[in-house]
């Protein structure tokens, strides 16, 4: 009996991978994220989860676009390049709304597991820190680096210029850790590591099942551009970004 089943599987045309890419197949693949949120909302009687997913979907696309513009303003090549349903100079894709909605929910799940409550003035301190250092970074690059070296962008990635790029993120995290304790650093590690792994696995699954690689990292990239360790710190920033958005939305609803 086993031999018959094995022979049927090996000779049949049934396939569990490499379906032809289409928007329909992509949305069928990612619909599990949407249905899981709806099911969770129905079980918990909290339809705020659906609203949160929708807001995260939009915020994620906006956020990654702004990040891409920020990176490309300092480096000659983009941090990543999208290849399917691209918009805004391939900084993002129309297919990204569902994954970003799911990504935002993943971050919020991590937050719940840490049992760390966002202090009332965290948003002000974190946001003002990153904005302050960002303004310093832009001013220094425009009026210092460009005049000294007569270059408009970094053409090669080095450890020093990557740290320079990440200064706003690092400064905001360090200042927040000073004010609110080392748990901020722990959460930063969680955000960066888990989001990096999940994004890599998502990209591999999409390519495995529907024969399409959605994006390619351009710097220090591994596995044909599926992953770069340079994304871990930006992913950590993404966690705080979604966390702040969630807190602001909840405050608006309460008021």
Image (cartoon, grey):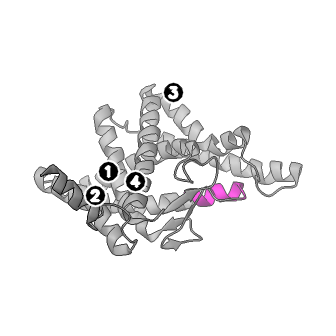
Neighbour class for label 4 at 10 Å: few (<14), some, many (≥20)? Answer: some
User: Distance of mark 2 from mark 1, alpha carbons?
Assistant: 10 Å
> Contact, CB < 8 Å: mark 2 with mark 1?
yes
At a point 45% along the width and 65% down the height, the residue shown is 212
Counting residues from the N terminus, which is met first, the one under dot 3 or under dot 4?
Answer: 3
Q: Which residue is mark 1?
A: 105
Q: Is residue 145 left or right of residue 99?
A: right
Counting residues from the N terminus, which is met first, the one under dot 1 or under dot 3?
Answer: 1
> Contact, CB < 8 Å: mark 1 with mark 3?
no
Considering the numbered disc 1 on the image, is that residue within a helix, a strand or a loop? helix
Neighbour class for label 2 at 10 Å: few (<14), some, many (≥20)? Answer: some
Residue 178, disc = 3
Residue ranking furthest to the top: 182
User: Distance of mark 3 from mark 4, alpha carbons?
Assistant: 35 Å
Q: Which residue is mark 2?
A: 33
Q: Nearer the viewer, residue 25 or 135?
A: 25
Q: Which residue is mark 4?
A: 202
> Contact, CB < 8 Å: mark 1 with mark 4?
no
Counting residues from the N terminus, which is met first, the one under dot 2 or under dot 1?
Answer: 2
């Amino acid at each position: 009996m086993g031999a018959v089943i094995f022979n049927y599987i090996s000779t049949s045309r049934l396939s569990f991978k490499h379906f032809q890419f289409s928007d329909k197949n992509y949305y069928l693949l990612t619909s599990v994220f949407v249905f899981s949120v709806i099911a969770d909302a129905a079980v918990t009687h909290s339809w705020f989860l659906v609203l949160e997913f929708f807001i995260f979907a939009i915020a994620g696309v906006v956020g990654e676009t702004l990040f891409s513009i920020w990176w490309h303003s300092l480096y000659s090549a983009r941090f990543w390049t999208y290849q399917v349903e691209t918009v805004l100079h391939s900084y993002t894709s129309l297919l990204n709304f569902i994954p970003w909605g799911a990504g935002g929910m993943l971050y919020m799940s991590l937050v719940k597991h840490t049992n760390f409550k966002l202090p009332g003035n965290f948003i002000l301190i974190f946001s003002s820190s990153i904005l302050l250092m960002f303004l310093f970074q832009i001013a220094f690059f425009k009026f210092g680096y460009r005049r000294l070296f007569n270059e408009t962008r970094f053409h090669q990635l080095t450890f020093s210029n990557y740290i320079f790029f990440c200064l706003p993120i690092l400064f905001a995290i360090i200042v927040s850790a000073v004010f609110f304790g080392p748990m901020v650093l722990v959460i930063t590690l969680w955000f960066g590591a888990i989001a990096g792994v999940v994004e890599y696995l998502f990209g591999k699954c999409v390519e495995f099942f529907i024969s399409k690689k959605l994006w390619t990292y351009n710097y220090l990239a591994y596995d044909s551009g599926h992953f770069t360790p340079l994304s871990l710190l930006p992913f950590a920033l993404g966690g705080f970004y979604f966390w702040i958005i969630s807190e602001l939305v909840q405050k608006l609803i309460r008021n």
